[in-house]
Image: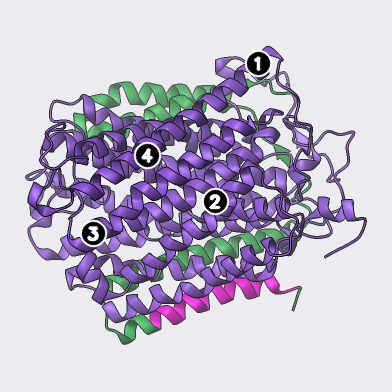
Amino acid sequence: MTLAPHTEPQRDDAGRPVPPGSWLGWISTTDHKRIGLLTVGTSLVLLLVDGVFALLLRAQLAQPEEGFLSPHLYDQLFTMHGSGMIYTVMTPFAIGMGVYLVPLQIGAPGIALPRLTLLGHWLYVLGALTMLAGFATPTGAHADGWFSYPPMADSVHSPGTGPDLWIVGVCLAVTGSILMGWAVLWTVLRRRTRGMTMLRLPVFCWSMIATCLMVIGSFPALLAAMVLLGVGRADPDVFASNVWNIGYQHVFWFYGHPVVYVMFFPYLAAVAEVLAVFSGRRFFGYRGTALSLLVFAALSMSVWGHHMFATGQAANDYYSLTSIALLVPAGVEYFGMLGTVLGGRLRLRVPMLFALAFIPQFLIGGLTGIMVGTPVIDYHVTDSYFVVAHLHYVLFAGSAFGLFAAVYYWFPKVTGTLLDETMGRLHFWLLVIGTNLTFLPMFALGYLGMPRRVVTYARFDGFGLLNLLATIGAAFLAAGMTVFAVNVLWTLRRRHLGRAEPAGDDPWQGHTLEWATTSPPPRLNFPADRPLPPVTSFAPLLDRRKGGDAA
Amino acid sequence: MKRHLPAVLVAGWGVLNGLLLVVLAVYRENSMTYWLWGGVVLVVELAALAVLVSSRAGTDQHVRYRVRDRGAGGVLPAAIGLLLVALCPVYGLWLLVVAVPLLMLSVALAVHGTTARER
């Protein structure tokens, strides 16, 4: 076990200590588990809010020439849905998982820079609220899409304070993510317990290294883009020439592509952990996967121009080349996942179901990404529903399924109680049906020429049936998310009343160190009377069960 | 080799990015993109070097350190103060009237040491 670190006891000069269970105890906590829970919990609430926005959008598009939403409100809703999901849901959830899990997985009693992490969390929360506050302004919330290109987003074409609030909110939320990302990176690099060498890190920790590198490397570009947009709104002459209109796109997409992997790697790694545990075997191709994550992170910063093919202002050949090169590390990761499952003794519990569904569904998102990374195809489908379908297959059919695999997998560690299996299975099947029914028709819609971000379409366009199918799918998604919310709240309520059956410290036969401590873990993560097992590989608990050193 | 693996990794990451930048140059991309990307690679490399130097200088830092928890009570007022400062370009400098006292309060709370008693 690691030596007990020095802690700061309640010294005479420690000021006024507050009880940990009080609201002040929660909002001023330096326990990484609480900060992680606050971040993940906030993200889940915002997931529901932004999900309701999506349902309103789908209701509007269910029929041709529908008038359920006004055009301006429709624009606000798709902007807040898209930007909210990216800036305030999937990214913070991924980093929040890192804040909670990384110290546990590396055997550390806490996170490095806990107060900075807490500041990051609160900046994120205030940023999210500021973005949403635009709805309370007379001209409404921001309405120019999550990337908000100038001159469309300048003060001439998008007047009002809603866009300004959105810019401020994005800056705060992203700053919060950067702070939390830096703390996670420093923790995994400098707080590992004895024996936990870099090549014994769990796959999830490797994913967080790659993720945080991208956060630190690319997120400041978004801050720069937001400052540029803010300056341009104050002085519209900035965007009078094409220099900064195209310049904005370069700076924005330098952030905009790596963030896709920030919203993907931690979920992919959660899936990898679940696949290994529920297959009863060590993760296959560990070193290749760790290396591929780093190569992926480096390549991710070289492909941004493929979002700009249609502008004619980017070196298409180069960006197409690097985009297609992403297939290599992606292939290594898929090889690892399939190699783990094949030949394993599978236990089809709810986390495993989500993890297994992730594999083919994300593949659709990834392969269509290669398609739109090819200029000739991109010219045809750019700004169409094909792109909407692609990004939702990546971020919902892929990442969100990884997110739910992670929630079901780590819920017993966090709370000491398992989520209900029956409701979990219902949630899973509703989501599988809803996801594919919603997003598969969008590929056809885009290919047939339906542009994205239109409030309605004419009857003679022939888009009615496919849109209706997509809206029915969205209803399935809403039902699935309702079941999930009920499951979580019902389980927590039963736990609160003492009626929930304890899950035990290691209900899944986990491989990594977080399963060696109590559920939930104590303040300093590992009880003093329970020594950590020797870390002999990236799966130390599996080694201990098998009674050998498998490094 | 194993001993120098971290340095090799950091150097390799830089070389890979450098190689990609060179290929980009072959395609004569806008000069702004080199500054943007090259600057980021440089910053990340410097951060990685800082980590490497830190790990060499304090070899037992990973097991001997303090778990900080004092003064966290000042974090939320600081975050709200920063929000108000950020809102100044939108609603005017008068917000500083609220923001500055909040930031001073956060400093006071940090110095005073208000914290959650978590153990």
Vertical arrangement, residue A54 with respect to residue B76, above or below: below
Residue drawn at the location 31% of the way across and 68% of the way down? A372
- Dot 1 falls on which chain? A
Q: Is residue A26 magenta?
A: no
What amino acid is at disc 3?
Gly
- Dot 3 falls on which chain? A
For mark 2, what is the residue? A267
Q: Colour of chain A?
A: purple
For mark 3, what is the residue? A446
Magenta span covers which residues?
B3-22
Nearer the observer, disc 2 or disc 3?
A: 3
Chain green in the figure, letter? B
Nearer the observer, disc 1 or disc 4?
A: 1
Answer with mark 2 or mark 3, whichever residue precedes in sequence.
2
Between the residue at mark 1 and the residue at mark 3, the CA separation in whole angstroms equals 48 Å
For mark 4, what is the residue? A172
Vertical arrangement, residue A334 with respect to residue A546, above or below: below
Which secondary structure, mark 2? helix
For mark 1, what is the residue? A496
- Please rate how many residues cluster around mark 4, counting C-alpha atoms within 10 Å: few if below 14, some from 14 to 19, many from 20: many
What amino acid is at disc 4?
Leu
What amino acid is at disc 1?
His
- State if disc 3 and disc 1 touch (CB < 8 Å): no
Rendered image quadrant of residue A98: top right
